[in-house]
Amino acid sequence: MKKLKNKVFCVIFFLLTLFTFMVFITSTTKTYMERKNTISDMLTKIPRTIENSEKKEEKKDPDFIPTMRTPDQDPRRIYLDFTIYTIVLDEEGNYKEVINHTNNDELDEETIEKIANNIIHNHKSDFYVGNLYTSKYAYTFTKGNTLIIMDNTELNKVLVNQLLSNIFLLLICEIVIFIIAYFLTKWIITPVKNSFEKQKIFVADASHELKTPLSVMIASADAYFNDKNDKWVKNMKNESERMIQLVTELLDLAKTEEEQDIMMEQNNLSDIIEGSILTFESLFYDNKLKLKYDIEPNIEMLCNENLIIELMSILIDNAIKHCEEKGKVIVDLYKKNKQIILEVKNTGLPIRKEDEEKIFERFYKVDTSRNRNSNNYGLGLAIAKNIVTKHGGEIKAHSSDGYTTFKVTWNQK
């Protein structure tokens, strides 16, 4: 069970973590690519802006010479969110002069020259954006022998801070995911754990019930070989019959717990119930018990006739076994509010409130002393509940006014 719990936890944690990482990576990549595409577009548009601006100047003045402009004079104010340097190169491609930049806190020309020369001497392509987390400058060489440099220092800081914030948020999410995975695992495992515990109890109880008659049979066989008394043979016969009954009930329980669908037909439930009751009349007489039944005629229901007969056999047998001496058993079948209701009542000791649901569990006995002479293994009501459930119904038990009532309810469609 512990291994299963760990596996379920790991699967849930992994899936939620994978989803969170995908969201994190997608969001971070999207933001990064948007910034990079913006810089790339700007580096592509700036040269055209310069060329168009200078052509206009040349038309006005044939002797036009590019000079340093202030941001207020420059038509390229749309780029003032970035620090951009426009460098004029000589015929050999070396630094000549800086004719424009958009940084209000102007760097001295010597610093700009160093930046430009570093790019000029080390560049491998005419257009470069680079890694925005590490590259301080993006640049492009234009046809007009001009170098456009974009300073990404501030953008580096913004992106790095954003990345660190996202990583911190991711760590918080992982803590939340751990907590969610823990409680989800607990929620998923609980029914499995309960089923596993019930299965362990079932195996232990079944082993106990089988072990006792086997021990009696072996002891009786040994005793018979010693004194050849027929009573030991009778003991073995009785215990063999008890084992057959237990094995039969176990097989019946297994059949009713199978997931496969059962064959059902539209049957007259009233006739099936009444016929089942009549087969027990002699048993009521032998036990000096009163039987009273009230069956509403012609109640039709989609059901498996054999299983309904078995259900009635279990409920009536249970009522007889737990009925007080010279007591009464009442069976009612009727329709009420689009429901078919079957009630089997008997006088006798009441069922305790805390046992009303437990009595339908396998091998559960209200009498903890386990009176073996009753041949009651605590499987009948478990089988009855499975039969009712397979027919889409519900069975409950309660005691009041001197009667113990088993009530079966089927909803009509």
Image (tube, rainbow, N blue to C red):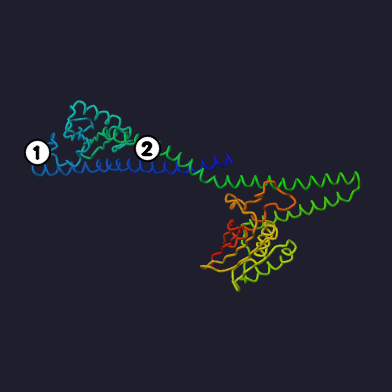
**Above or below for 44 versus 394:** above
Q: Amino acid at mark 1?
A: Asp
**Above or below for 59 versus 159:** below
Which residue sits at x=65%, y=51%? 362
Q: Residues within 10 Å of mark 2 (few under 14, many from 20)?
A: few
**Above or below for 285 versus 13:** below
Q: For residue 289, what is the image quadrant? A: bottom right
268 with respect to 52 (left or right): right
- What secondary structure is marked by label 1? loop
- What secondary structure is marked by label 2? helix
In terms of depth relative to the viewer, which is nearer, 328 or 113? 328
In three-dimensional space, the C-alpha distance between marks 2 and 1, rounded to whole angstroms, equals 59 Å
Residue 182 can be seen, yes or no: yes
Residue at the far top in the pictured view? 110
Q: Which quarter shows the N terminus?
A: top right
Image coordinates of residue 176 in percent, x first then y, are 42, 39
Q: Amino acid at mark 2?
A: Leu
Residue at the far bottom in the pictured view? 298
In terms of depth relative to the viewer, which is nearer, 140 or 331? 331
Question: Sequence-wise, which precedes: disc 2 or disc 1?
Answer: 1
Residue 124 can be seen, yes or no: no
Numbered tag placed on residue 169 in the rendering: 2
The residue pinned by badge 1 equals: 63
Q: For residue 57, what is the image quadrant? A: top left
Which residue sits at x=56%, y=64%? 410
